[in-house]
Amino acid sequence: MTRYFFLFTILLAASGFTAAAEPVAHRVLAADRGRGHLAILGIDGTVEWEMENKHDVHDLQMLPNGNILTHTSSTNVVEIDPKTKEIVWKYEAKPKEGYKGRIEIHAFQRLDDGNTMVAESGNTRIVEVDKAGKIVKVIPLTVKRPNAHRDTRMVRKLASGNYLVCHEGEGAVVEYDGDGKIVWTYKLDLGDRKRSDGHGPEGHGVEVFGAIRLQSGNTLIAGGNNNRVLEVDPKGKIVWQVDQKDLPGITLAWVTTLQVLPNGNIVIGNCHAGPENPQLIEVTKEKKVVWTMKNHKTFGNDTAAALVLDAKSK
């Protein structure tokens, strides 16, 4: 049977026909405040695993040991063993000396040396903490209009040792060196549209959410309520973008998740976009949509953090 199928495939190819490609499907880890949980969806869309978490989750990381790094409150970063649903590591952010205001954590990252990077809004700093939860490094951030809710969104430590920081309240992506010195800045603009209020597709501003540094040296930016994805070069020139209405049948709202897959495709998080729109979208650099996650039964309109699990990011 296998031999005949193989011969049939050769004949089809010789005649100019090809067999239909398998539809793209992904396993996904995501969090949704409205549904109040973390969950893993299988490629068939069914829930493989879930755990209650009512916090407004803005970051997720699947660790090499299979555990999940996330946050359960505005000040607590935790590592969860999905098998037992137990917290096996925890860091609690506290006000730095001289500061008595609120702290919010929106970003964190387990580093190659085993330490964990945490961005502390309110404290206006990045810290690296060891396995015992002890702060071993502090990187001060420059924030012109301090606001514990808006100082930072996504933050990532780069291979160079620098830090790529999204300052939501200032509409800027800023790269800091290891001492907290600013070495690169990109300011978002409104893209020839007027500012408007709202978290849904009607809202428009420069409240940036995410950014990742590409192997090319360019920076890929999830614009938040800028309703678009931008790729900018080191000089700040836009070299590629997906605007709010560029994808057929899809409207972008608050753009959050960014993940570059090994094949070069980009997974885009589309939060607050309403039930008529998918929460995750995989696109090619030619802006062809090859996969979406539109699952408003398991995840609602507040899916700000999500991660494709079956393909390692670049």
Image (tube, rainbow, N blue to C red):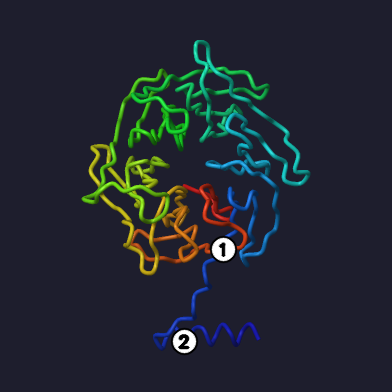
Specify the amino acid type for callout 1.
Asn
Q: Position of residue 259 (x, y in %)?
A: 47, 49
In the image, residue 287 sits, relative to residue 62, either above or below, namely below
Q: Position of residue 91 (x, y in %)?
A: 64, 27
In the image, residue 224 sits, relative to residue 277, either above or below, namely above
Q: Which mark is residue 277?
A: none
Number of other residues with Cα within 10 Å of mark 2, as a class: few under 14, some 14 to 19, many 20 or more: few
Question: Which residue in the structure is indicated by mark 2?
Answer: 12
Residue sitting at 63 percent across and 41 percent down? 64
Q: Is residue 310 left or right of residue 267?
A: right
Residue sitting at 23 percent across and 37 percent down? 235
Question: What element does badge 1 sit on?
Answer: loop
Specify the amino acid type for callout 2.
Leu
Work out whether mark 1 precedes mark 2 in sequence or the reverse, and give the earlier one.
2
In the image, residue 136 sits, relative to residue 149, either above or below, namely above
Residue sitting at 62 percent across and 53 percent down? 35
Residue sitting at 55 percent across and 50 percent down? 307
Question: Which residue in the structure is indicated by mark 1?
Answer: 295
Q: Quadrant of residue 150?
A: top left
Classify the position of the N terminus by image quarter: bottom right
Q: Position of residue 251 (x, y in %)?
A: 38, 61
Of residues 237 and 9, the one drawn nearer to the viewer in this rendering: 237
